[in-house]
Image (cartoon, rainbow, N blue to C red):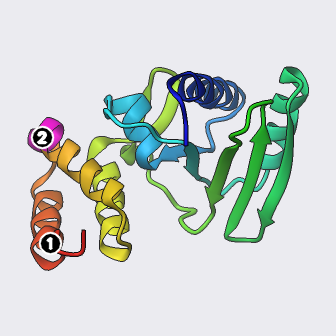
């Protein structure tokens, strides 16, 4: 559990790492709740960094960042499809960074740079969030979809709106 002070420190490290990464390369795309929080003003805390990339060098950037900041990290997973690390920045909570290499052919048309952070446009983030919601029972996914509908519905294309309608009608809120 995070105190308010812990959340502020954790969020600072998240933003600091993403700014560092985006100043070094444009090969990592932020997605998920943290993308919604930092780039689209989601009003809930998100504690990890989820990225898409075909670049297999995330540990190089984590290592450089940690050396500059006097942090440590550990590799938790290193496969062809997923790389995961945890940064220890001196607090009880660690920052999880996970890179998926499953989608290596990402169209530049789906990407935007918001506040110096490369992420997906709101339409594509919605599609990714809807896919996550359909495959797991996490209240945060429903919360995020509700946030998108309430704040960005008019920016979604018709196919995405239909996908949301289908997913929400197929998988209601009964399991919560």
> x and y percent of residue 104 in the render?
58, 62
How far, Cα to Cα, is label 1 from label 2? 17 Å
Q: In which quarter of the image is the N terminus?
A: top right
Residue under the point 46% across and 20% down: 115
Q: What stretch is highlighted in magenta?
A: 150-154
Judge whether 70 appears above or below 50 on screen: above
User: Dot 2 lies on which element?
Assistant: helix
75 and 56: which one is in front?
75
The x, y position of residue 15, in whole percent, is: 58, 26
Give neighbour class at mark 2: few <14, some 14-19, many 20+ (Cα, 10 Å): few
Please give the residue where the numbered disc 1 appears in the rendered image: 172
Which of marks 2 and 1 precedes in the sequence?
2
Q: How crowded is mark 1: few (under 14 residues within 10 Å), some or many (20 or more)?
A: few
Q: Residue 135 carries which label?
A: none
In the image, residue 77 above or below residue 174: above
Q: Mark 2 points at which residue?
A: 150
Give coordinates of residue 73: x percent, y percent.
Answer: 84, 43
**Residue drawn where x is 72% and y is 57% of the image:** 84
Query: Going by the image, does 89 lie left or right of 15?
Result: right
Residue 152 is inside the magenta segment: yes
Specify the quadrant that holds the C terminus: bottom left
Q: Nearer the viewer, residue 6 or 15?
A: 6
User: Does residue 153 show up magenta in the picture?
Assistant: yes
């Amino acid at each position: 559990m995070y105190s308010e002070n812990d959340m502020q420190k954790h969020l600072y490290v998240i933003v600091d790492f993403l700014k560092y990464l985006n100043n070094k390369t444009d090969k990592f795309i932020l997605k998920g709740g943290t993308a919604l929080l930092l780039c689209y003003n989601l009003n809930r805390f998100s504690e990890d960094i989820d990225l898409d990339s075909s670049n297999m060098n995330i540990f190089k950037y984590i290592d450089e960042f940690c050396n500059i900041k006097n942090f440590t990290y550990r590799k938790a997973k290193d496969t062809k499809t997923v790389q995961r690390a945890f940064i220890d920045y001196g607090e009880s909570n660690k920052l999880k960074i996970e890179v998926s290499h499953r989608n290596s052919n990402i169209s530049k048309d789906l990407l935007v740079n918001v506040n110096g952070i490369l992420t997906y446009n709101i339409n594509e983030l919605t599609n990714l969030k809807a896919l996550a919601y359909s495959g797991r029972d996490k209240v945060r996914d429903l919360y995020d979809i509700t946030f998108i509908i309430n704040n960005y519905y008019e920016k979604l294309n018709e196919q995405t709106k239909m996908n949301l309608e289908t997913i929400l009608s197929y998988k209601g809120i009964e399991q919560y």
